[in-house]
Image (cartoon, rainbow, N blue to C red):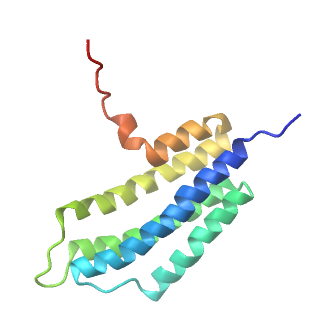
Amino acid sequence: MTPSPEPVRTFHALALVQGFLLCFALGFLYTFIPRRTGTSGPSVVQLGASLVLPVLLTASAWVEAWLWSQLLFLGQLVVLLGFVVPRVLLPAEGRGVPEGMVWVPVAVGTGAAGAPGCGWAARRAPSWWPRGCGWCSSGRWRAASPRPTEGP
């Protein structure tokens, strides 16, 4: 009997999206937001957490501790929201916030809303893991939006 490829696929998805892409987004937001809003960069605690949490969540996924990986992801999103929200709400004097910046906290919030669903699917309904995480993590808005109708 051959082992199921499901844990390997799951690890790869989490390592890619919640590991690598999260680090890319953190680096971008930690430099872009202070420049646009004229506010300070991340604190030592925020930066330290952002250095450690993605590594720990990837390691948790490697050992198939799916619930822990999602809890660590939630922790990182809380740190990120703690950085983004105050700077977007209170930019420096004379600095405006670009209109598109409203999507940053919305995107982080929807990621935070999806993480418990992924953790639940991993613990309680492993067969729903690929569908649940796909819907919760990446396709939430597309799945909820009406489908275009095909022509005649």
Q: Nearer the viewer, residue 107 or 13?
A: 13
Q: Could you tell me residue 29's position as x and y percent? A: 37, 72
Q: Nearer the viewer, residue 82 or 50?
A: 50
The residue shown at (43%, 74%) is: 27
Give the quadrant of the C terminus. top left
Residue at image coords 57%, 68%? 54
Q: Is residue 136 above or below residue 102?
A: above
User: Which quadrant of the view contains residue 43?
Assistant: bottom left
Query: In this rendering, would 143 be left or right of 38?
Result: right
Q: Pick the quarter of the image with the N terminus.
A: top right
Q: Residue 138, percent across and down?
A: 45, 47
List x then y, in percent, for residue 141: 36, 42
- Residue furthest to the right in view is 1
Give residue 69's quadrant in the image.
Answer: bottom right
Q: Is residue 133 above or below residue 22?
A: above
Q: Position of residue 109 (x, y in %)?
A: 38, 57
Position of 28 with respect to 127 (left or right) is left
At 64% from the left edge and 52% from the top edge, which residue is drawn? 12
